[in-house]
Image: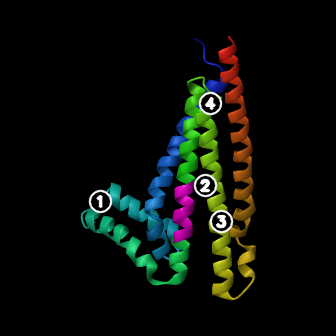
Amino acid sequence: MKKHSVERLAAVLRVLVTIALICNLVILYLVPVAVVSGGTSLPDSVLNYLNGLFRPGEDDIVAAAAAASFLAWFWVWKSAYQAMLTLFLVVSGVCTAVILRQARNVLGSILREEPFSLANAMALRRAAVCGFLISGAALVRVIFNMAYYASLRPLASYNTLFIPLFAMFGLLCLVMSALFRQAADLKAENDLTI
């Protein structure tokens, strides 16, 4: 059977979503390393760290680097700011991983030619909940930063943009979930009629 353009696109998107999910999980593990490093030279430090892991030199100790990245999970709780930043990034990263996993499931059902199913409706509902959680985490972080700095300056940060952006994403996923649920019900009703 010849694949339609939608199925080819779904196959390509599923591969891209899988790559994004794997990258998200790797970066999620490295969140404390990024927070502890202070973010001043984050790209260089993370690049050097990964370079040392995958291509160790004569004087590189891979086990020490791996241990340091594990210990960074304990070091980040020393200050309130680092703890809040780590919590925000971890919650956002876990929710993003769940959203990517749900997208992968939906794309898989499209490849199986079963797009209108209750499983897709539930996957979109889970993605909506994760979108609302990211929005809530951003709101908590903005409020924390306003109290921490005793200023309104955090209102001009990217976190403030996350609040309505992910709230709208959650609402859109809820609407899509309701549509998929209704389509699945109509499909089941039509299948019983025939």
Instruction: Say if the magenta span includes residue 187.
Output: no
Cα separation between marks 2 and 4:
20 Å
Q: Is residue 91 magenta?
A: yes
Q: Residue beneath label 3, please?
A: 136
Residue 78 vs 32, above or below: the answer is below
Residue that label 1 marks: 56
The answer to whether residue 13 is seen in the rendering is no
* Mark sitting earlier along the chain (4/1): 1
Along the line of sight, which residue is nearer the eye, 29 or 135?
A: 135
Q: Which one is nearer the viewer's eye here, 38 or 117? A: 117
Q: In the depicted view, which residue is nearer to us: 115 or 160?
A: 115
Earlier in the chain: of badge 3 and badge 1, it is 1
Q: Do the residues bearing badges 1 and 2 touch, measured as CB atoms within 8 Å?
A: no
Identify the residue at horizontal 74%, vertical 47% (top origin): 172
N-terminal of the pair, mark 3 or mark 2, is 2
Quarter of the figure with the N terminus:
top right
Q: Earlier in the sequence, mark 3 or mark 4?
A: 4
Q: Which residue occupies 51% across, 41% down?
A: 18
Determine whether the residue tagged by mark 4 lies in a helix, strand or loop. Answer: loop
SS of the residue at dot 1?
Answer: loop
Cα separation, mark 1 vs mark 2, equals 38 Å
Question: Is residue 150 visible in this depiction of the protein?
Answer: yes
Specify few, some or many for label 1: CA neighbours under 10 Å numbering under 14, 14-19, or 20 or more.
few
The percent position of residue 150, horizontal first and vertical second, equals 69, 89
Closest to the observer, 162 or 42: 162
Query: Going by the picture, which residue comes out furthest to the left?
Result: 58
Q: Secondary structure at mark 3?
A: helix
